[in-house]
Amino acid sequence: MLRFEYHNLLASKMFPSAIPVDKLSEYTSACDAAHKEILSDRQVDILGFYNLPEQSIEHIVDFMAKLDPMFDTMVVLGIGGSALGNKALYSALRTEQELPRKLFVYDNVDPIFLHEILSSINMDSTIFNVITKSGTTAETMAGYMILMDIIKQRFPSDYRKRMIITTDKEKGFLRQIIKTEGYTSFIVPDNVGGRFSVLTDVGLVSSAFTGMDIGELLRGAAAMRDRCQTTDILANPAYLNGLIHFLYYRQGKNISVMMPYSNSLYDFADWYRQLWAESLGKRKDIKNRDIYVGQTPVKALGTTDQHSQVQLYAEGPNDKIFTFLTVENFKHDYVIPNLHPDREEVSYLGGRKLSELLNAERFATEIALSQAMRPNCNLIFPQIDEYHLGEFIMMYEIMTVFTGKLLHINPLDQPGVEAGKIATYALMGKAGFDKERAGIDSYKKELGLH
Amino acid sequence: MLRFEYHNLLASKMFPSAIPVDKLSEYTSACDAAHKEILSDRQVDILGFYNLPEQSIEHIVDFMAKLDPMFDTMVVLGIGGSALGNKALYSALRTEQELPRKLFVYDNVDPIFLHEILSSINMDSTIFNVITKSGTTAETMAGYMILMDIIKQRFPSDYRKRMIITTDKEKGFLRQIIKTEGYTSFIVPDNVGGRFSVLTDVGLVSSAFTGMDIGELLRGAAAMRDRCQTTDILANPAYLNGLIHFLYYRQGKNISVMMPYSNSLYDFADWYRQLWAESLGKRKDIKNRDIYVGQTPVKALGTTDQHSQVQLYAEGPNDKIFTFLTVENFKHDYVIPNLHPDREEVSYLGGRKLSELLNAERFATEIALSQAMRPNCNLIFPQIDEYHLGEFIMMYEIMTVFTGKLLHINPLDQPGVEAGKIATYALMGKAGFDKERAGIDSYKKELGLH
């Protein structure tokens, strides 16, 4: 079971300036209200991620059973919620479990990045998975057109088996292509927003492909969901962590650092970055005044960033709340040989495991930050496996929605990305954006840009 | 030449709430004072990075000329300033220039990460480069002992040629080992701090190994340094950018986002993270009161993070200043084929280059953020090569020191990392830390930890 250590989030003898535990009870009615809103959202089926543990995964099992065994690599074409979860799961388990098949995620339109992926794969044994709900995401569709063109030319007789498409179940351009061309397809459901979709076909297909036990992912998620049904705040890790993050945010801590002491879990900090930023970073209208809310998520890596960020974390402004991710048992480990028993600079390391040093440094950083009165908590993975990752995903999804309710914003939309999309359409000459194009031209003229 | 576009940092018709250009002249005397302090620091030789362009690189050229051609891979063992620059340079040029030799940087004590590197390399053709000035960095020395043990056992007759050591020129344990064992060695100089050391042997040896033109790196750095000697603030990109960051920080923007629109440059945002955080995140004593200063650097990636962070950037709190990195010309590029000319959802992409889409999205994000009154600027790389990377490195090193002077802190120290180091020694049982160990035991007891 994933364990949540929060002793450095609440006031203690060592850390008197933290939030007193009594403070939490002042928010009982706010928490109850948030809880009720979640229940009613679930009633109208806009929080579908809660029910994903019970979904059938037969169709994925079936896909894997029928898959041509020549495929040893998958390239996902997707971005944001159609990429970050896939990458995070793969990075977490790739080496830890020595997964038998490879995954690449092309989640940009950088030509060098595409060149790098194309140089790294064997096209003959690679299957592509295009993931976009709308079928209009510019980045994903650009990649789709380039790669579809390549595989059609290279494999004119069997290109159809080399591309699968994950999109809306009925609507959109890609669904039509699936029907006319006969590609294998998967569904991005209506009731699960992109950034909450890692446990749908979006994340499960690539995970099953690489060799993960996706049933275990869902069992872990179910266990955490069940643990997070209670309104007894101290027994509900998602609600408790959400409430405390909310309280520190209101105290002016506008930055939330997630710092895994594990390279394997580093990409989960990126997944968290989207979840937290896009869900909670919102403009709201209070009495005709715009109010801007949202805590900025930051990823850091232990111990690496002790030599980069900890100076700022310990002695810079007290504007952050920290979450460590700790792994207790690693599948591979190394004992540090005592090469220089007579040299006290290094002899204390001799005979100790690398994981011991890693976790001692994690604990040392906890102590140093607590001494500097910087609130911090710790999520402990007994080991990195599908079950614990499923727990983690569900905990953070619930925590995010709950915190959104406390902030009185809609954690499920993202209206602020429209302006950039429209400007891109205008700049790329898409039909129907002449007015915006004229606006951009005058902007450029004003600033003397070409 | 690297170009610095700052029109969205200063007030204009489109962005009236930005800092007015007149405001800058109020800081003329502060800037002059900062400039004078830099000159006097250079006089007493504590800002050695300024003079690195004139250093001799003969010894590196010589090392490469004599190197056994069987080596096709280098593994750097280092952390923080002994790793981030190496990684950033390699990531920037690896694919862009198809570098002939590989680099891995083991900059953590994560056992899975070590397992991954050991699984990826061919030990027979790998040379290791241990980089630590003091020879006492726990992470680096742990890696050194594990790997030295492996290569000694595997190559008893010629292990000496498989390890090079970069450390203090006279002091420390590793320098002694170099003398007794006869390893090839390089120097971490006294007058260049770790996070400013990428253009010393620390970063140059691995760069030369992988196939970069390190002379060009230095020529680019020299050109930027010469450009940044003037106190005419608008003509000095390092001073100008430093001053404006300082002013926005004082207005409450405690976050600085660096967002390359280039996967190749993403690791340079990590290099910047250390430089900015560790140099400027400081406690200072004003009239016996502790004041905590420092802006938190954040890395983001375009276009990828448009689908993750831009919602927060555009509609969350106005607490950030943004720096885009733009690349004008990529060595590899792809034209998007017009696969579906009858579908307006995607036909506008047809016939355009990937790089055009990438840079249109960059410009669209600039417009969207400016409309939302979020200050942003743009650094333009005509192309990614050694010369422009050298310019970039020098610009940011000067900018960081200058900003530190404006903040009245010492940008060259890092006193805040000591507490964590001491706690690690205590936890790992190093001799002489009994008192600290007792303190930690009582901390654990108090909190009921085991």
Image (cartoon, coloured by chain):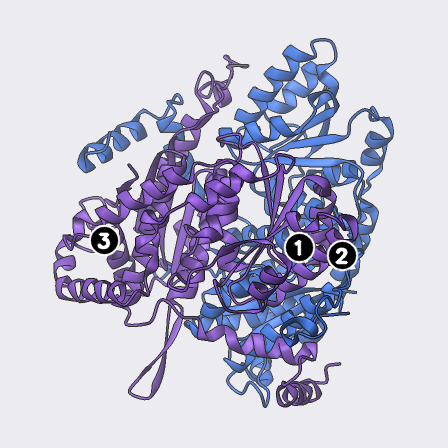
Chain colours: A purple, B blue
Q: Residue at x 73, y 55 (%)?
A: B389
Q: Secondary structure at mark 2?
A: loop
Whether the residues at callouts 2 and 1 have beta carbons within 8 Å, the answer is yes
Q: Is residue B221 above or below residue B420?
A: below
Q: Which mark is residue B384?
A: 2
Q: CA distance from mark 2 to mark 1?
A: 8 Å
Amino acid type at mark 3: Leu
Same chain shared by disc 2 and disc 1: yes
Task: Please check whether the numbered discs 3 and 2 fall on a single chain.
Answer: no
| Quarter of the image where one finds residue B384 | bottom right
Mark 1: few/some/many CA within 10 Å (<14, 14-19, 20+): many
The one of B213 and A167 positioned closer to us in this rendering: A167
Name the side, left or right, on which A165 lies relative to B212.
left
Position of residue A404 measured from the top left corner of the image (x, y, whole percent): 31, 66
Q: Position of residue B20 (x, y in %)?
A: 56, 84
Residue A309, position as x, y percentages in the image: 48, 49
Chain letter of disc 1?
B
Separation of marks 3 and 1 at Cα, in angstroms: 38 Å
Q: Which mark is residue A240?
A: 3
Determine the CA span between mark 3 and mark 2: 47 Å
